[in-house]
Amino acid sequence: MVRKMEKGKRFYYIQSGNWEGITETDSRSEACSIILAEAIEKLQGDAQVSPKILSIDLSPMGDTGEGGSLKLHDSSEVLADAGLHGSASILKKIISNYE
């Protein structure tokens, strides 16, 4: 894959459960929501979601100093951000039972 770098857009690697993906967007949280929605759509009933979703900023450091940084996101929050509020609520209850 080759892409022309665009000001304001960053390149993110996202991974959780049994899936991973790469997208270009202007925010890390949006990248998580986009790739999560794609994983659910493409894998349908086989998409697994772990309690955390990993995001890695693959963009060069540039002005922000964030290049290469990684972050863990609560899966229930990402599900809610993607508009999957019912699934977010169910996952949150499951996780709280194991804490």
Image (cartoon, helix red, strand yellow):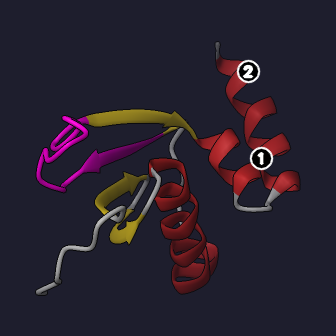
Residue 30 location, x and y as percent? 55, 58
At x 14% / y 47%, what residue is drawn?
Answer: 62
- Name the chief secondary structure element in magenta: loop
Residue nearest the observer in this picture, 43 or 21 = 21
Q: Is residue 18 left or right of residue 41?
A: left
Looking at this view, name the residue that lies furthest to the right.
86
**Residue 54 against residue 97 in the figure, above or below:** below
At x 54% / y 64%, what residue is drawn?
Answer: 36
Task: Describe the element under mark 2 as helix, strand or loop.
Answer: helix
Residue nearest the observer in this picture, 23 or 53 = 23
Q: Are dots 1 and 2 in contact, CB under 8 Å?
A: no
**Residue 57 against residue 24 in the figure, above or below:** above
Task: Describe the element under mark 1 as helix, strand or loop.
Answer: helix
Q: Quadrant of residue 10?
A: bottom left
Residue 51 location, x and y as percent? 55, 36
The numbered mark, 1 or 2, whose residue comes first in the sequence reads 1
Residue 96 is labelled as: 2
Q: Is residue 21 left or right of residue 34?
A: left
**Residue 5 against residue 99 in the figure, above or below:** below
**Which amino acid type is marked by label 1?**
Ala
Residue 52: in magenta span: no
Q: Which residues are magenta?
A: 53-69
Residue nearest the observer in this picture, 46 or 78 = 78
**Which amino acid type is marked by label 2?**
Ser
Residue 88 is labelled as: 1
Residue 56: in magenta span: yes
How packed is label 2: few (under 14 Cα within 10 Å), some, or many (20 or more)?
Answer: few
Residue 77 is labelled as: none
Q: Say which of marks 1 and 2 sits in front.
A: 1
At x 44% / y 49%, what residue is drawn?
Answer: 28
